[in-house]
Amino acid sequence: MGVGRQVQQYATRRVTKKLTRAIPWLGAVIALATLGAAIRRKGFLGGTFDTALDFTPVVGTLKNLAEVGRGRDFIRDKVRLKPDTTD
């Protein structure tokens, strides 16, 4: 995963966290939007579990800090096969 993508994910999580504290009903909308993106990237179970951990107050913070220190996600993205373009 590139550094740019990690920075984007980190910034998205920080903005999301601040918004969910400021406006609780907006947090539910953001959680649903994040859930959809996580399910597309990680699959149904992985995406649901990842989103649930991220939105749990203390656990999500610790998980995100550990992922930043580790340099990769605990719950990996789905393996996507590249289309064969050797015609």
Image: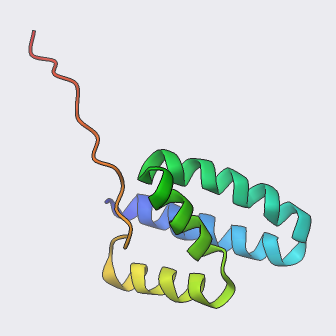
Q: Which quadrant holds the N terminus? A: bottom left
Residue 76 is situated, as x and y percent measured from the top left of the image, at: 34, 62
Looking at the rendered structure, the number of numbered marks drawn on it comes to 0
Picture quadrant where residue 81 is located = top left
* Residue 56, horizontal then vertical, whole percent: 66, 80
Q: Residue at x 29, y 40 (%)?
A: 80
Residue at 76% over, 76% down = 18
Q: Residue at x 9, y 16 (%)?
A: 86
Please state if 21 lies on the left or on the right of 7 as rendered.
right
Considering only vertical position in the picture, is 4 above or below 53? Answer: above
Relative to 27, 38 lies left or right:
left
Q: Is residue 38 above or below residue 58?
A: above
Residue furthest to the front in view is 45
Task: Give the quarter of the image for residue 12.
Answer: bottom right
Which quadrant is the C terminus positioned in? top left
Residue drawn at (71%, 67%), measured in percent from left and top? 16
